[in-house]
């Protein structure tokens, strides 16, 4: 087997911009999904999913 080369990164060399950008992207996606759910489900007269499921379950 070949030798494995590894390099330790010190605290001063660590650059957290990639991690921060990934967190921001996830937060933006979560916010967009929440807004979509809010405006589709709860802004109308009744929630659409519950409005469709309840009559099917009862009758």
Image: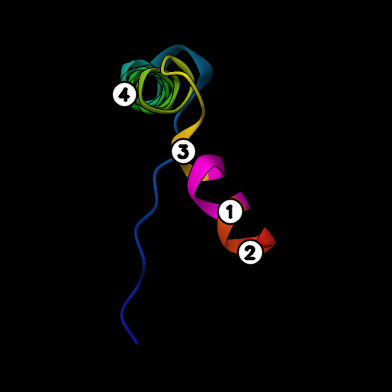
Query: Which residue was labeled with disc 2?
Result: 59
What segment is highlighted magenta in the picture?
50-54
Secondary structure under tag 4 reads: helix
Q: Is disc 2 surrounded by few (<14), some (14 to 19) or many (20+) residues within 10 Å?
A: few
> Are circles 1 and 2 on residues that touch, CB within 8 Å?
yes
Tell me where residue 39 appears, x and y as whole percent.
Answer: 37, 18
Q: Residue furthest bottom?
A: 1
Kindly report which numbered mark, 3 or 1, lies closer to the viewer in this rendering: 1
> In the image, is 27 to the left or to the right of 29?
right
Quadrant location of the N terminus?
bottom left
Work out whether 29 lies above or below 28: below
Q: Quadrant of residue 31?
A: top left
> In the image, is 57 to the left or to the right of 5?
right
Query: Which residue was labeled with disc 3?
Result: 8
Tell me where residue 44 appears, x and y as whole percent.
Answer: 41, 18
Query: Could you give the CA–CA distance between mark 3 and mark 1, rounded to whole angstroms?
Result: 62 Å
Query: Could you give the CA–CA distance between mark 2 and mark 4, rounded to whole angstroms?
Result: 44 Å
Residue 17 or 35: which is nearer the viewer? 35
The overriding secondary structure of the stretch rendered in magenta is helix
Work out whether 1 lies above or below 7: below
Quadrant location of the C terminus?
bottom right
Work out whether mark 2 precedes mark 3 in sequence or the reverse, and give the earlier one: 3
> Are circles 1 and 4 on residues that touch, CB within 8 Å?
no
Query: Could you give the CA–CA distance between mark 1 and mark 4, rounded to whole angstroms?
Result: 39 Å
Q: What's the colour scheme?
A: rainbow
Query: Which residue was labeled with disc 1?
Result: 55
> In the image, is 54 to the left or to the right of 25?
right
Secondary structure under tag 2 reads: loop
Q: Residue furthest front?
A: 59
Q: Is disc 3 surrounded by few (<14), some (14 to 19) or many (20+) residues within 10 Å?
A: few
Query: Which residue was labeled with disc 4?
Result: 25
Residue at image point 52% right, 17% down: 11
């Amino acid at each position: 087997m070949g030798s494995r080369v590894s390099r330790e990164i010190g605290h001063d060399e660590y650059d957290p911009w990639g991690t921060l950008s990934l967190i921001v992207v996830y937060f933006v996606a979560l916010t967009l999904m929440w807004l979509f759910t809010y405006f589709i489900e709860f802004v109308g007269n009744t929630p659409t999913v519950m409005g469709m499921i309840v009559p099917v379950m009862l009758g």
